[in-house]
Image: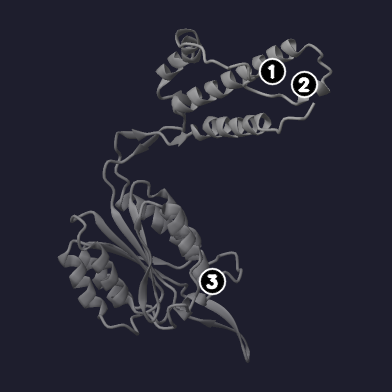
């Protein structure tokens, strides 16, 4: 809806007319204040009549510009739909494994060649957009761990950065401990109970400087709760030299360590063998980490004053250009 912040500004509408009658008239000394070269082209023989017409047009133009300036001064705004926001939210980071093993296409139940990482991007991205009121951050890890998105309320940007993650860009190995340690560094100043890390991996710690169990103990010391999700199917059919073969693509998944991490920090461990289980896990995480309801209502505000102000400027500029047309020799 449209809102006028300062409607009293329109009370100034008759001000130019009051000044015209209250202030003394300027002495023109017989010199016309405005020369209109188009008068002769219109075939107007009566010079006084032509001057009256020009003066009338000038008054109309000035009135129009004055009204535009008043509209800008009244500060018009467009109010969007009301949004209810929580008073306080969590600081939640998502740590996603982008090592080489995340290239395996075993989570999509449709049988397509969609990789584990592609499924995680879609499901986790939807989860992030539901976290209204939370500050979200993104950690990507392979052989090394790094911050892809610092904590922010801009959920759309976090999802875009997640979608831009590429397998192998952080190395082929898996540094789970370093990813947790990086989250501890970023969330150490967060009040206890308000910091959450969701760790998604399909392997075991094969790289990094910090052992995962030691990182979990550090996380527990600052009150960081970690939920871990182990992804990957138990069986996958591949083509071999002697025909199709069944293999276990998740044989390297270190569930024992992941369970230790979650138990130490007060979180839960989940196992996702396909897309449906992964979607169910994130729905369960929504229940475990519910969005805190609040009574703070805000309405997005879009300022509109620049439209009438810009129109007044452009119209004044055009009017001035017409007034500055050089005088014709008669």
Q: Find residue 137 and report its image quarter.
A: bottom left
Image: 222 above or below 100: above
What percent of the width, then of the height, locates residue 18? 47, 10
Most foreground residue, 85 or 27: 27
As helix, strand or loop, the secondary structure at mark 2 comes to helix
Within 10 angstroms of label 1, few (less than 14), some, or many (20 or more) residues? Answer: some
Mark-to-mark CA distance, 1 and 2: 8 Å
Above or below residue 7? Residue 269 is: below
CA gap, disc 3 and disc 2 = 76 Å
CB under 8 Å between callouts 1 and 2? Answer: yes
Quadrant of residue 97 within the rendered picture = bottom left
Q: Which residue is mark 3?
A: 115
Quadrant the C terminus occupies: top right
Q: Residue at x 29, y 37 (%)?
A: 294
Q: Residue at x 78, y 11 (%)?
A: 46
Q: Residue furthest left?
A: 221
**28 left or right, relative to 222:** right
In front: mark 3 or mark 2?
2
Q: How is the protein colored in the picture?
A: one colour
Label 3 or label 1, whichever comes before in sequence order: 1
Q: Position of residue 2 (x, y in %)?
A: 49, 25
- Position of residue 202 measured from the top left corner of the image (x, y, whole percent): 41, 74
Mark 2: give few (<14), some (14-19) or many (20+) Cα within 10 Å: some
Q: Which residue is mark 1?
A: 54
Tag 2 residue:
39
Q: Nearer the viewer, residue 18 or 281?
A: 18
């Amino acid at each position: 809806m449209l809102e006028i912040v300062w409607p009293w500004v329109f009370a100034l509408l008759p001000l130019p007319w009051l000044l015209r009658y209250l202030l003394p008239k300027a002495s023109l000394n017989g010199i016309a204040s405005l020369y209109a070269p188009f008068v002769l082209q219109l075939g107007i023989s009566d010079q006084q009549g032509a001057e009256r017409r020009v003066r009338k047009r000038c008054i109309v133009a000035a009135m129009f510009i004055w009204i535009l300036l008043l509209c800008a001064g009244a500060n018009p705004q467009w109010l969007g739909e009301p949004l209810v926001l929580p008073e306080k939210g969590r600081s939640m980071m998502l740590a996603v494994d982008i090592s080489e093993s995340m290239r395996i296409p075993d989570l999509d139940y449709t049988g397509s060649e969609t990789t584990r990482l592609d499924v995680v991007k879609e499901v986790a991205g939807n989860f992030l957009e539901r976290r209204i009121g939370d500050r979200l951050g993104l950690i990507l890890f392979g052989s090394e761990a790094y911050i892809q998105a610092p904590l922010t309320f801009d959920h759309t940007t976090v999802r875009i950065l997640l979608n831009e993650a590429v397998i192998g860009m952080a190395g082929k190995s898996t540094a789970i401990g370093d990813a947790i340690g990086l989250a501890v560094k970023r969330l150490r100043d967060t009040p206890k109970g308000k910091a959450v890390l969701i760790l998604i991996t399909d392997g075991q710690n094969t790289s990094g400087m910090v052992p995962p169990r030691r990182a979990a103990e550090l996380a527990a010391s600052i009150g960081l709760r970690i939920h871990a999700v182990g992804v990957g199917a138990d069986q996958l059919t591949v083509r071999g030299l002697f025909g199709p073969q069944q293999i276990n693509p998740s044989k390297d998944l270190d569930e024992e360590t992941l369970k230790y991490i979650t138990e130490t920090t007060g979180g839960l461990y989940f196992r996702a063998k396909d897309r449906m289980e992964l979607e169910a896990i994130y729905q369960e995480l929504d229940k475990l980490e519910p969005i805190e309801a609040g009574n703070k209502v805000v309405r997005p505000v879009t300022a509109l004053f620049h439209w009438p102000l810009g129109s007044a400027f452009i119209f004044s500029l055009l009017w001035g250009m017409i007034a500055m047309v050089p005088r014709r020799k008669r």
